[in-house]
Image (tube, helix red, strand yellow):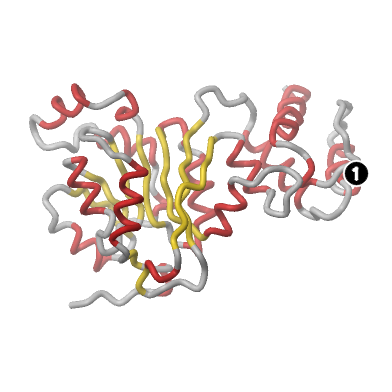
Amino acid sequence: MKHIARKRFGQHFLTDDAIIHAIVDAIAPLPGQAVVEIGPGLAALTQPLVERLGHLTVIEIDRDLAAQLRQHPHLSVIESDVLNVHFSQLLAAMGSAWPQGQAADATASAPAVARKLRVVGNLPYNISTPILFHLLTHVDVVADQHFMLQKEVIDRMVAAPCTSDYSRLSVMLQWRYQMHNVLFVPPASFEPPPRVDSAVVRMVPWDEPPVLKVQTLATVVQVAFSQRRKILRNTLGKWLDEHQFEGDFDLQRRAEEVPVEEYVRLAQSLASATD
């Protein structure tokens, strides 16, 4: 029986073979790598991925689709909301999930990134930002991420300072990832077609990211962008005064004019002052 896309799950199923192959080529999966696919849906990406990998773990919230996916002998299916999945624990569990004899072969042949998760998926657009922030809390066990998202979201993710797309999302993700927009995907590539353009982003965690308290950075950036058209002295400046910050930070700018590195240094200074 044909599966009907469910609006509450934000389901749009990828059907364009050329796009599917381009995405898989961009991911470049190798046998033995610990790959997790979020939202496999009708298995458009799942099948070519598992053909290259030998085994794949998928996270699917739709119980009907999860039941169909369980019939595949080379899939481990987690039926869950991805926001409830603890990826750090998942990596540990995946080490014992391979069929007998396969784990040793995979470990011997796979590159070092196989000991971390590679996360891929066509993310539901209605909760894509919460998913990105959820994964940010597990970034230490992630080798890389390849996601299909609304193009507008990816534009914000990779935006440079002093542009209209530069935002809280830009700062919070660029602090921790190198990111590249790798592929444009038109609405006609899906069934049903979404009302927006899509794209695929590659996210690779920095090897040595700046050390800071994530919540401090998150708070600083949230306050700064709360009224992005105002000069920072009227928003972030007041907040810094309340927290008795005495360091050097130029508040005669708007939030979108401050590079990621300066937000990071401010967060580090604030954390040091309270330690």
Of 109 and 107, nearer the camera is 109
Point 31% across, 39% down: residue: 28
Of 84 and 74, nearer the camera is 74
Q: Quadrant of residue 26?
A: top left
Image height of 174 relative to 48, above or below? above
Of 271 and 68, nearer the camera is 68
Decide if residue 213 is in sight here: yes
Q: Is residue 52 left or right of residue 238?
A: left
Point 12% across, 32% down: residue: 102
Question: Which residue sits furthest front?
Answer: 18
Q: Position of residue 225 (x, y in %)?
A: 75, 50
Badge count: 1
- Residue behind mark 1: 233
Q: Position of residue 233 (x, y in %)?
A: 90, 44
Q: Position of residue 113 (x, y in %)?
A: 34, 28
Helix, strand or loop at mark 1: helix
Under mark 1, the amino acid is Arg
Q: Is residue 128 left or right of residue 70?
A: right
Point 32% across, 35% down: residue: 91
Q: Quadrant of residue 63?
A: bottom left
Q: Position of residue 269 (x, y in %)?
A: 76, 25
Image height of 262 relative to 57, above or below? above
Give the quarter of the figure containing the N terminus.
Answer: bottom left
Image height of 203 relative to 16, above or below? above
